[in-house]
Image (cartoon, coloured by chain):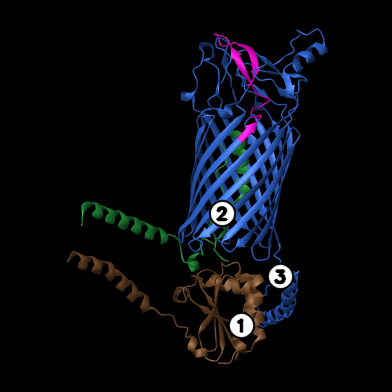
Amino acid sequence: MQLNKQAKKIRDNNQLGEKLALAAAALLGTTAHAQSNDAEWNFSTSALGYSESDRVSAAELIFTADKAYGDAALLNLKVVLDSLTGASANGAIEQNSIQTFTRPSGKGRYAIDPNTTPLDDTFKDTRVQINASWSDNFRPDLRYTIGGNISKEYDYQSLSVNGEIAREFNQKNSTLSLGVSFASDQVSPEGDIPLAFSSMVVDQGQFANEGAYWDAFNATRIENSDSITTSELLVGWTQIVNRRMLMQFNYGYANTNGYLSDPFKVLSVVDSTGTTQDLVYENRPDSRAQHSLFALTKYHLDKSIFDISYRFITDDWDINSHTIDTHWRFLGDNNSYWEPHFRLYQQGAAEFYQPFLSQAEAVPGLASADYRLGDMTAFTVGLKYGFQLDGGDRAEIRLEYYKQTPNEANQPDGIAGLENLELYPEVDALILQFNYYF
Amino acid sequence: MSKRHRIKLILVTNLLLVLSGCSSWGVAPWDRDLLAKPEMALNSSPLDQSIDDHIYFSKEASSGGRSFAGGGCGCN
Amino acid sequence: MLKKIAILLLVFPMLIANARANEEIPTIDISQFNGKVVYLDFWASWCVPCRKSFPWMNKIRQQYSDDQLVIIAVNLDKKRELADSFLKEYPATFDIYYDPKSLLAKKYQIKGMPSSIIFNKNGKPVFAHTGFFLDKIEQYEAEINKLISASK
């Protein structure tokens, strides 16, 4: 109530002040700025097209709205819509002959040509995500943020909350921040969750009737959904070095528990000649603990701004990764700019990553042939152009090229019969994005 | 002065010099003109950042690590 | 002997530093406003809360006469064009003083942006504020009113 009275009093006084300011401005011949205690909404939108050669394509739409309240409070809302189509590797290796696989739902099959990486193209998905966050100052040097997110697609649902506290020191030259987040996800794949290492049931005429096929298929299913929970902690230190330079250092810890396997992925079990004898569903650990270290530097030169960051991540799946990311923004007239971008990523394979299984060996406790868990190097090169329109709105256009190459030297030993097959295909993608701010 | 005392003095002096150097890191409040620019914010392209995070989360095994508090104009 | 040299080495740079600091004293002389309350404000085009402090300073400018209150807003932009474009959007009915080398800011040792110092009729700094807050406007106005109402 007190605050409302104050606000009303200020507003009343400002009417007069505003009128006089406007009058003064008219005399001076300038345009006055109407004062309001509540700021306006700031909006941004983004449209993205992502396309891998021969594989997945995605389109994404983002809409955000920001509003400031009072002296320091900020409300942030975001909606994301994305749609995926195309084909994704199912984990099996290519062969010299045609291979047939059962679709994840169990309804129907698909055939893959010889000497072609098996891709499952039943994969179509649309997702909606909503984020909201609120931040404000407890004191001029102490700020808090709380936020929540919901994400839903037909076979996956995620709910998360996060909070952060930031304290400033040394006349706001240093900031210490502490953030936590908790997420609870539910995965309900089409065709249900498969039993780890059970064989993929492929109808090749061996069943007396459809009922017999479904009995066999259902025998490989354990439940229709499972959950995943993630807890994360992030500690950060930001330091202003001088008038042109800023640095940030973060340590992060993340712990994930639940169903972490990919229900759609299999491994090929091959004999000594490299011929696939069986296809089995993968099995990953049911927990993952990850540590990350991140360092970022931003430097403002005369007509350009440069930034470079390094990130190291290690986890108990034995995956170690290094990321270097850098941008250089060249500032032009009328708030326009060009910004080249380069990113280099290198990852070591997960302990249980196996491109395929050998019939001669015992079935391991854990295995996955998902190429995304393998030893690989990826780079991104991109260029972004930003400009301001006449009304003051801003726009940006970004074009990027991403290429992922498995590090063949570090791959597990092959088998004689597989030498002329492409076991470790590359993946590359083109990204085109438009941003608009108003 | 004994050898131990001399070493202690050198170490303490060095530490003080380093620490006083640390407190000279940073800028006076009126010198934050460049740092106040939106492009110098830690997360200066939030749309790009969230898109990149999403893409790399889907294509790579490691994800996360960033956060965004600090820098800026230091006002209020 | 070694002790004396050490002391000299430590003290000498401090003497030099002080000497340099005394050279370039900026030129606002508060004593010229004797008998009036002075509101000295430090701002810059990049200071976001200044977009709110300017309309408020316009308001108190018209609330008190020139004989009662002096308002000087010291601009700390390094380039004049930046201050000019801010003033186009947020015009000021009070005086602007340009301090691109931040000499006045250093003299008054301001701790943050924006900053304000309120001097009483005797030219003594009585109230100082770091930052500009909408929910402190009542307090700022009470302080100005108190100093203006006070006799010399």
Q: Which residue is mark 3?
A: A36
Identify the colour of chain A in the image: blue
The amino acid at mark 2 is Ala
Q: Position of residue C82 (x, y in %)?
A: 55, 70
Q: Chain of mark 3?
A: A
Query: Which quarter of the image is occupied by the N terminus of chain C?
Result: bottom left
In the picture shown, does residue A376 fall above or below B73? Answer: above
**Which marked residue is nearer to the observer: mark 3 or mark 2?**
2
Labels 1, 3: front one = 1
Tell me if residue A347 is in the magenta stretch.
no
Give the residue displayed 57% in from the left and 53% down from the top.
B44
Quadrant location of residue C151? bottom right
Is A207 in front, or is A141? A141
Label 2: element kind? loop
Q: Which quarter of the image is occupied by the C terminus of chain C?
A: bottom right
Residue B69 is tagged as 2
Looking at the image, which is closer to me, C103 or A30?
Answer: C103
